Amino acid sequence: MTAADAPGAKPPAPAAATSLALDRLSWSVGGAVIVDDVTMHVAEGEFVALIGPNGAGKTSLFNLVSGLTRPTAGTVSLGGADITRDAPHKRARLGMGRTFQTSSVFADLTVGANVGLAVQARTGDSRRFWKRAGADGGPEASAALDLVRLSHRADALAGDLSHGDKRKLELALLLARRPRLILLDEPMAGVGAGEIGELTTVIRDVHREQGCTVLMVEHHMEVLLDMADRLAVMHHGALLALTDPDSAMADPDVQAAYLGDGA
Ligand SMILES: Nc1ncnc2c1ncn2[C@@H]1O[C@H](COP(=O)(O)OP(=O)(O)OP(=O)(O)O)[C@@H](O)[C@H]1O
């Protein structure tokens, strides 16, 4: 009898199912290989940060994941379903949500109405939205605003928000669509130093409380180290490392890539 067979022994924890799977993914333009044979599996609920020097191919890989561009080779799967040929809106319906480096909020609407519209876009219930939009966009919008710590700004015009608060609003817009997988494209870009700490906390709360999978591109290394389960390090279009943050930062190849002599 092994220890695992002993009476009262706990069964081994089941391995988490794969959320996002990229298999041998490549993308070439005009003869240049921009994404080079990337294989990466992200588990349900995992937080993976995609890092790498400028021009490494991070945004290009994001575009392949979200469907903005089609790979020249390889596959993208979500929850086991092959979505390689699916358009971005179909991926969104399957539970993939993405923020962009440029803001996508309606500047002339209130914060609450922006989130209310996102809820309505999911439920398709325009009557319910317009009935409640005047107040705060409805209870689901309020819950999303609470989670991103923006409830106190529900009546403000979205265009009047600081960069950091706009990023929180974009997260609330994503949450309203109830994604299984969130793609965050440089959420700290343009955000003032004083707002980075709170935005980091909000992203961490969203990940923990919603239990969704997160893939995030970010240059601010200091926020990633205690946030991400694993770092995926890209260099010259290829995946150089995919491991826990400490191991990734200690990897000589990763250090060389950041110093510019890792070619
Ligand atoms: N449509 C395109 N046509 C030609 N080259 C492209 C195209 N898109 C990206 N590239 C090139 O591919 C490389 C990777 O670009 P990408 O934007 O994916 O890198 P990145 O890692 O996101 O960089 P950064 O950190 O600076 O945002 C760059 O050399 C870029 O010039």
Image (cartoon, rainbow, N blue to C red):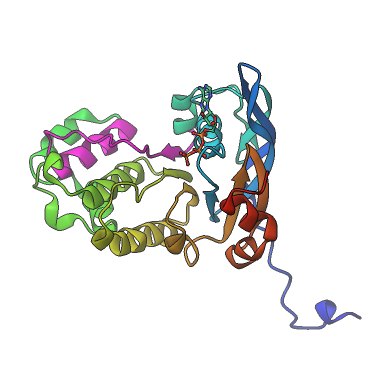
Percent from the top left, x then y, of residue 182? 45, 45
Q: In this view, does 195 lie above or below 68?
A: below
Left-right relation of 152 to 4: left
Q: Which residue is drawn at 60% across and 63% down?
A: 249
- As drawn, the residue found furthest toward the top would be 30
State which quarter of the image contains the C terminus.
top right
- As drawn, the residue found furthest toward the right would be 1
Q: In this view, does 241 lie above or below 131?
A: below
Percent from the top left, x then y, of residue 53? 53, 46
Number of labels in the image equals 0
The span shown in magenta is 94-123
Q: In this orientation, which residue lies closer to the viewer: 180 or 99?
A: 99
Q: Residue at x 9, y 46 (%)?
A: 156
Left-right relation of 238 to 5: left
Q: Which residue is drawn at 88% across and 79% down?
A: 2
Left-right relation of 156 to 37: left
Asked if residue 33 can be seen in this view, the reply is yes
Quarter of image, res 220: bottom left
Q: Does the magenta stretch include residue 99?
A: yes
Quarter of image, res 61: top right
Q: Is residue 49 magenta?
A: no
Percent from the top left, x then y, of residue 111? 16, 44
State which quarter of the image contains the N terminus.
bottom right
Percent from the top left, x then y, of residue 49? 52, 52
Left-right relation of 165 to 133: right
Quarter of image, res 256: bottom right
Q: Residue at x 23, y 41 (%)?
A: 115
- As drawn, the residue found furthest toward the front would be 261
Asked if residue 43 can be seen in this view, the reply is no
